[in-house]
Image (cartoon, grey):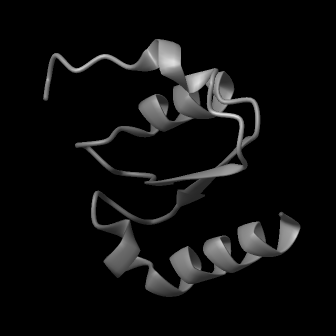
Amino acid sequence: MFRFEETATLSQISVPTLVLVGKSDIATRPVASQRMRAEMPQAKLEILAPGGHLALMERNHQFAEAIREFSWTQ
């Protein structure tokens, strides 16, 4: 898993994509999510704060709102 590299694929993702990350995530660092956002043509980045790797559970209302807003804009 640590040697898996798919960066070149990101620019080929042509569907609207929501990238969600916890501001304090130490496993999937926000800088990685920012790079994903920069490489995908139709991506939106949402940073959940405060939140770590389990931001889905830690910030569940904020997470749900981000999903709701994203789905309405598509």
* Position of 20 relative to 36 (above/below): below
Q: To which quarter of the image does residue 1 belong?
A: top left
Question: Looking at the image, which residue is at 66% across and 25% down?
Answer: 38
Residue furthest to the top in view is: 8
Residue furthest to the bottom in view is: 61
Q: Which quarter of the rendering shows the C terminus?
A: bottom right
Residue 14: x, y in percent? 71, 35
* Position of 66 relative to 44 (above/below): below
Q: Is 39 in front, or is 30? A: 39
Residue 63: x, y in percent? 53, 75
Residue 65: x, y in percent? 65, 80
Residue furthest to the right in view is: 73
In this rendering, position of residue 40 left or right of residue 30: right
Question: Looking at the image, which residue is at 74% across and 67% down?
Answer: 70
Q: Is 8 in front, or is 49? A: 8
Q: To which quarter of the image does residue 42 belong?
A: top right
Question: Looking at the image, which residue is at 43% across and 30% down?
Answer: 32
In this rendering, position of residue 35 left or right of residue 3: right
In this rendering, position of residue 74 left or right of residue 33: right
Question: Looking at the image, which residue is at 55% across and 25% down?
Answer: 10
Residue 40: x, y in percent? 66, 30
Count the numbered circles shown: 0
